[in-house]
Image: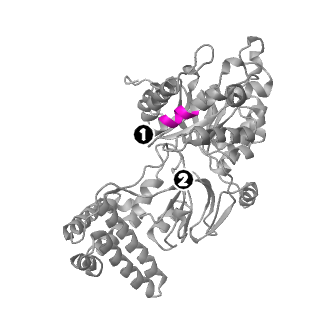
């Protein structure tokens, strides 16, 4: 993964608070043919659709959210304003397309409101823009993209306040899906900023052109108090950021999402039915024969595709061949770069082919038994050489299961966007006891202080970077450990199918 320089971003402080995380570009996707010139009926249908959508937005929550009700009232009033919708109708009658006509009317109304010189009226210009975006979405049949299953820093042109409320609500007992907003437009007096402040959600506005400068998964630090952010932060930027005060990670055990560990492609669908948040670990070693040989590329691709296709818009973490039978000190995992390079390259190509057959699934390529950033760089070179050009790129992940990786974690985090912690190997390597040898089984104590010192380091480092960190292994399946793991900054646990919330379901 190429290293990029830290980039400071300076915008408008709209809502206070500080957050770290990975960016997600919130860009609506059009699914309908844009209406052509002169289609006034298309505008009328869009107005009716937005008016209908606004009514329940304000009334369903009633007094529980007076701000949202007020926003709905404002936008319903704008829909009836002849200076806005009337101007759009005139433009269509003059030969403009409905999309262009709405844009022309919105730009004119924005200019008028901003020209008054009153900050409050300038904020209402953002309400006009929000309504314009709603009308555009209705005209184009636009859909909002689904959020990834981990918390994100949302990057958007603008976000209507009611959409923000939907996005900011935690999923069940899990963490809030949006940690902060970076917006190209907007100021501190907009309804979106007001609602964000009430909910403790940091917001920076006025970051013109940001969507064109960032990619999904980019690391970012957000300081809503100062209206400043840092894109691609390095260790020094992270250190300065945390000198202003630690991020809170005192979350309850219920905030940990439960992901599934699986061994077979067919298990992915079972895990989804049983309520898993995603696939934490697809152990691909089951595809190897007794001699460690892998199936042909096409057969591997079929197996991986079945798992990926079971999780559209979800996340499937696929671990590269690990060969655990060779022992913790043998040629396992990433060491295949030297001991089985052809097999590793074929697996990467097969994963790339499978990704092309499930483009809506987030595929994390997880490197096991890593001890050095050099190993990740060499793996990245294999991916660059063997990954099909027409396949969506994988998300780089690392399995932290050696003390070397845990103690020198920062260079690894510079190169990945996902972390899984293999507590079984981490424990046996930390205490120097083979987990397969019953003679030393008593040393494999999950309460060992050295193990938790390493876990604390991993959890906090990942939380600082906003990198999802999922704990796998026997320790993750023990409910008594989850509150402690959550407090350290971990975002989830990977458990077996039998330990998922819906494991008693007859569907499984």
Residue 421 % position (x, y): 66, 34
Q: Residue at x 47, y 45 (%)?
A: 171
Residue 369 % position (x, y): 70, 31
Report whether 422 appears left or right of 132. Answer: right
Which image quadrant is residue 367 in?
top right
Label 2 belongs to which residue? 216
Q: Which residue occupies the foreground of this view, 93 or 313?
A: 93
Per the rendered image, the range of residues in magenta is 348-353
Q: Residue at x 71, y 34 (%)?
A: 370
Residue 349 covered by magenta stretch: yes
Q: Does residue 351 lie above or below 17 as drawn? A: above
Residue 246 % position (x, y): 70, 55
Q: Does residue 407 lie above or below 142 as drawn? A: above
Residue 495 covered by magenta stretch: no
Is residue 308 in view from this perspective? Answer: yes
Residue 34 % position (x, y): 29, 62
Label 1 belongs to which residue? 312
Specify the principal SS of the magenta part.
helix
């Amino acid at each position: 993964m190429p290293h990029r320089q830290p980039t400071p971003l300076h915008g408008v402080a709209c809502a206070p608070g500080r957050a770290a995380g990975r960016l997600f570009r919130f860009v609506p996707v059009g699914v309908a043919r844009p209406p052509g010139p002169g289609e006034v009926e298309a505008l009328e249908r869009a107005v009716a659709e937005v008016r209908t959508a606004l009514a329940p937005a304000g009334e369903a929550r009633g007094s529980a959210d007076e701000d949202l009700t007020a926003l709905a009232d404002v936008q319903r009033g704008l829909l009836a304003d002849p200076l806005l919708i009337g101007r759009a109708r005139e433009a269509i009658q003059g030969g403009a397309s409905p999309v262009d006509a709405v844009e022309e009317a919105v730009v004119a109304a924005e200019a008028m409101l901003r020209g008054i010189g009153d900050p409050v009226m300038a904020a209402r210009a953002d309400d006009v823009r929000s309504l314009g975006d709603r009308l555009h979405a209705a005209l184009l049949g636009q859909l909002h993209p689904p959020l990834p299953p981990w918390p994100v820093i949302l990057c958007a042109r603008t976000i209507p306040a009611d959409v923000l409320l939907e996005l900011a609500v935690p999923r069940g007992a899990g963490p809030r899906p949006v940690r902060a907003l970076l917006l190209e437009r907007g100021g501190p007096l907009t309804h979106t900023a007001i609602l964000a402040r009430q909910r403790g959600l940091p917001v920076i506005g006025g970051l013109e052109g940001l969507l064109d400068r960032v990619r999904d998964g980019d690391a970012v630090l957000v300081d809503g108090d100062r209206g400043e952010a840092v894109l691609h932060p390095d260790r020094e930027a992270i250190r300065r950021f945390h000198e202003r005060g630690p991020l809170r990670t005192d979350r309850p055990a219920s905030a940990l999402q439960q992901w599934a560990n699986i061994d077979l492609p067919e298990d992915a669908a079972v895990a989804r039915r049983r309520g898993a948040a995603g696939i934490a670990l697809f152990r691909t070693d089951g595809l190897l024969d007794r001699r460690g040989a892998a199936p042909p590329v096409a057969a591997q691709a079929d197996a991986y595709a079945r798992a990926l296709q079971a999780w559209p818009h979800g996340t499937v973490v696929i671990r590269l061949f690990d060969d655990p039978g060779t022992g913790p000190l043998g040629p396992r995992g990433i060491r295949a770069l030297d001991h089985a390079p052809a097999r590793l390259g074929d697996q990467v190509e097969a994963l790339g082919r499978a990704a092309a057959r499930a483009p809506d699934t987030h595929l994390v390529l997880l490197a096991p038994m890593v001890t050095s950033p050099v190993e990740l760089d060499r793996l990245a070179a294999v991916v660059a050489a063997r990954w099909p050009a027409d396949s969506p790129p994988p998300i780089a992940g690392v399995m932290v299961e050696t003390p070397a990786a845990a103690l020198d974690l920062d260079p690894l985090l510079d190169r990945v966007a996902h972390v899984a912690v293999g507590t079984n190997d981490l424990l046996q390597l930390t205490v120097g006891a083979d987990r397969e040898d019953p003679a030393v089984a008593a040393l494999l104590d999950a309460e060992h202080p050295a193990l938790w010192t390493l876990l604390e380091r991993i959890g906090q480092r990942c939380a600082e970077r906003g990198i999802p960190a999922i704990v796998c292994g026997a320790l993750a399946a023990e409910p008594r450990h989850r509150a402690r793991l959550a407090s350290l900054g971990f975002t989830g646990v990977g458990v077996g199918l039998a330990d998922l919330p819906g494991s008693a379901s007859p569907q499984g």
